[in-house]
Amino acid sequence: MARTIDKIVRGMKTSDGAGVKLTRLVGTPVLRRIDPFLMLDEFGSDEPTDYLAGFPDHPHRGFETVTYMVEGRFRHKDNHGHEGLLETGGAQWMTAGRGIVHSEMPEQKEGVVRGFQLWLNLPSTDKLCDPTYKDLQKENIPVAELPGGVTARVLAGLVGDVKGPIERSKTEPIYVDVTIPAGASVTIPIPRGHAGFAYPFEGTKLTVAERPLERGELAVLRDDGDELVLKATDGDVRVLVVAGKPLNEPVVQYGPFVMNTLEEIEQAVSDLQAGRF
């Protein structure tokens, strides 16, 4: 059975880091979160002043970040000794766990920078796990070749017989970048019980569950089926499909700290100030 749309929202223009301009799609007053997802930012500009300041050292605790670089070059460094270069078509999956301080800085002074950062919550049992970091270069992300010339880059989840390189037992995430030629359609499996969304970021129009969706509109999906039907109606379209199993746990967030209680937030602040990250 095909899923339908619960609501359609547009993002909010804002900035983060040292002034990088972006659009916040999840994590706004209009759409606070889609359990287990806490935030989705889209960044994109060919104006260097919009991104050159980057994201200098900043802390995280209690969740995971997924940065997907559509175009451009950013370098990650953190206080646990991890370092990686994020290039066009690549991604990084970082588990902050009990605490990490990292930076994401551009390695280019001109040209286009485009991409997304997604925040994925951790269950209460894993919030104080050891921090980890995984680089996924373009060649590490498998591509599913589907009927009608459709392609799907699978970061997480299963499309056909193509399995993404990232797995999480509690949230069972799906993260797919789907390119649909004009007039073609595709069905993406999403298990019942998963919360999710679809977001077209290239092209003009597509239909999601037979409803029109334009560039810049995010469709929050109902949990009323086990697949999502997408169709490009006016030119080629590229769309993110993201879903995950809700944790159904309390969320207390203070900036870059996401825990289950206020006391845990206070402990996070204290640990950061004491240099225990």
Image (cartoon, rainbow, N blue to C red):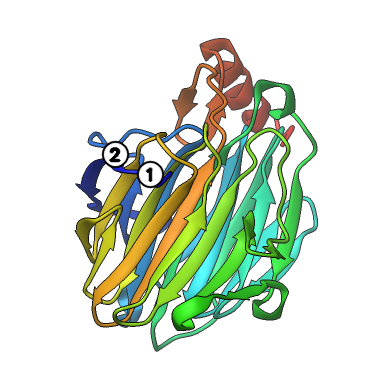
Query: Residue 250 got which mark?
Result: none
Q: Nearer the viewer, mark 1 or mark 2?
A: 1
Examine the rendered structure and indicate whether residue 272 appears above or below residue 48: above
- Determine if residue 61 is in view: no
Examine the rendered structure and indicate whether residue 193 appears above or below residue 105: above
The picture places residue 57, in percent across and down from the top left corner, at 57, 53
> Of residues 21 and 232, which is closer to you in this image?
232
Q: Are marks 1 and 2 in contact (CB under 8 Å)?
A: no
- Determine if residue 226 is in view: yes
Crowd band around label 2 with a 10 angstrom C-alpha radius: few (<14), some (14–19), many (20+): some
| Helix, strand or loop for disc 2 | loop
Q: Label 2 is placed on what type of residue? A: Thr
Q: Which residue is disc 1 drawn over?
A: 3
Q: Label 1 is placed on what type of residue? A: Arg
Q: Which residue is disc 2 drawn over?
A: 28
Distance, label 1 to label 2, CA atoms, is 24 Å
Q: Quadrant of residue 92?
A: bottom right
Examine the rendered structure and indicate whether residue 277 appears above or below residue 14: above
User: Which residue shows up at 72% across the image and 74% down it?
Assistant: 140
The picture places residue 1, in percent across and down from the top left corner, at 43, 44
